[in-house]
Amino acid sequence: MTHYVAILEDGGDTKATGVWFPDLPGCFSGGDTLDEALANAPDAIRVYLESLNTEGLPPPAPRGLAALKADPAWADDIARHVVALVPVLPSAFRPAAE
C-alpha cells in the first residue's frame, strides 16, 4: 500500500487542525481534532488523485520522511508539526481515462 506523508498543524481549542501533503501540491484537509483531521486525510488524497486521473495526469510519487526532512522546502514544517503517514488504497491509482 502506498503512503503519503501528511503534516498536521494542531489548531488547539480555537482553530481546526490542518493537514497538507508535501508531495500533493494543493491537497489539504482538516478537522476539529487531530484524530478527525487524520480520519479525513485519505478522502482528501482520493479526491486529489481522482482529479489528476480525470485530467490524464499520473499521481505524484510519494517521498519518504527522510527525503522530505532533507528538502529545505519542507524541513521546517516537519520539525514544527505533527507528521503522519496516510495510506492510499491501490484503487486510487487507476490508469488515466482515455
Image (spheres, grey):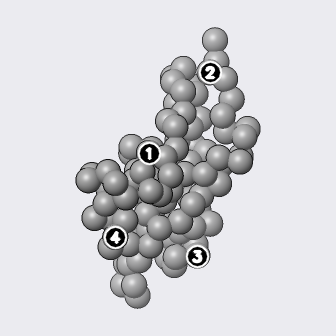
Residue 6: x, y in percent? 48, 59
Q: Secondary structure at mark 2?
A: loop
Q: Amino acid at mark 2?
A: Ala
Residue at horizontal 39%, vertical 45%?
26
Q: Amino acid at mark 4?
A: Ala
Q: Are marks 1 and 4 in contact (CB under 8 Å)?
A: no
Residue 58: x, y in percent? 54, 27
Q: CA distance from mark 3 to mark 2?
A: 32 Å
Circle nearer the N terminus (4, 2):
4
Q: Are marks 1 and 2 in contact (CB under 8 Å)?
A: no
Residue at horizontal 61%, vertical 45%?
46
- Is any part of residue 51 visible from this angle? no
Mark nearest the camera among 4 and 2 is 4
Circle nearer the N terminus (4, 3):
3
Residue topped by disc 1: 23
Residue topped by disc 2: 96
Circle nearer the N terminus (3, 2):
3
Q: CA distance from mark 1 to mark 3?
A: 21 Å
Mark nearest the camera among 1 and 3 is 1
Residue topped by disc 3: 35
- Closer to the camera, 83 or 96? 83
Residue at horizontal 54%, vertical 33%?
59
Residue topped by disc 4: 79
Mark nearest the camera among 1 and 4 is 4
Q: Secondary structure at mark 3?
A: helix
Residue at horizontal 59%, vertical 35%?
50
Q: Are marks 4 and 3 in contact (CB under 8 Å)?
A: no
